[in-house]
Amino acid sequence: MTEAKITLAVLISGSGRTLKNFIDLATEGELPADIRLVVSSTTNAAGLRFAEEAGIKTRVVCRGDFAAGVAGDKEFGDAIFDACREAGVDYVAMAGFMKLAPLPDDFAGRVVNIHPALIPAFCGKGMYGDRVHQAVLDAGVKVTGCTVHFVDNEYDAGPIIWQQPVPVFDDDTAESLGKRVFEVEKEAYPHVLKMLVAGRVKLEGRRVTIAKAARGERSRAGAYPDE
Ligand code: GAR
């Protein structure tokens, strides 16, 4: 039986490490994903080259090309999601995408994001990359992590699908902590995509529940508490 693939558009703004991880895992047969489109919010996102190298269609949609304010936000979001619609994807994965792109109704529950902290801590507008890790260090917390969540129309506020903790060490810098968190992100995000395509993720209000893996379903056995 051929394995179902998740059809995906990936939204990026920067280095594209998350996109590269998806592409590598899909190429190795470790992630059943058909990445049909990469949308960047800037022409100089380094990650665009990973899409080009992999032969994935790309689009650049810059927030600055639309008016300021709420109406411009909506037009920006519409331009992005029109491209996703055209590409015929089931899901959209934000991967270091730094802009607010309001969702049209038909994409509700079909857009996911990863944030490099345990939401609702250390998140919101302006919280990305090393700023998040520096805020974690400044607050003196001992545990941080990553969160994969459904996207709604606010920054980092949608229903949480999956979280994984990462310890904070006394001698951490934002850079060392960021590296440790990213290693965990590289497992957590693909894991969520696999659960989505397997139909195991159920969203009710703010709560997400995960059905147990079916017998024989390919997974990283033992690595996660639900398996
Ligand atoms: C990841 O660490 C992700 O959690 C973070 O950007 C990095 C991915 O970007 N996202 C955020 O901070 C969103 N608020 P990259 O794939 O371009 O390196």
Image (cartoon, helix red, strand yellow):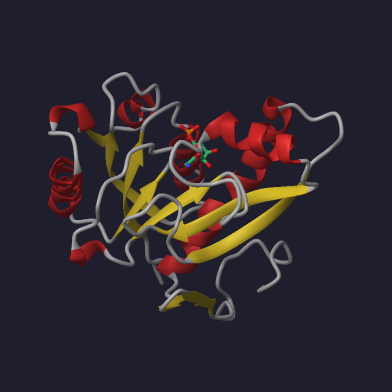
Q: Is residue 58 above or below residue 211?
A: above
Between residues 56 and 180, which one lies in front from this camera angle?
A: 180
Q: Nearer the viewer, residue 205 or 163?
A: 205
Residue at 30% x, 27% y: name it: 52
Q: Quadrant of the N terminus?
A: bottom left
Q: Can residue 62 be seen from the camera position used here?
A: no
Quadrant showing the C terminus: bottom right
Rendered location of residue 35, percent (x, y): 33, 47
Q: Quadrant of residue 40?
A: top left
Residue under the point 54% across and 80% down: 211
The relative height of residue 79 versus residue 44 in the rendered view (above or below) is below
Q: Is residue 66 above or below residue 215?
A: above
Residue in front for this viewpoint, 111 or 171: 171
Q: Can you give x and y, in whole percent of width and height, for residue 207 in the image? A: 49, 76
Residue 158 location in percent, x, y?
A: 42, 61
In the visual, does 173 lie left or right of 147?
right
Q: Residue lying at the far top in this picture: please name it.
A: 44
- Which residue is depicted at the point 43% across and 67% down? 196
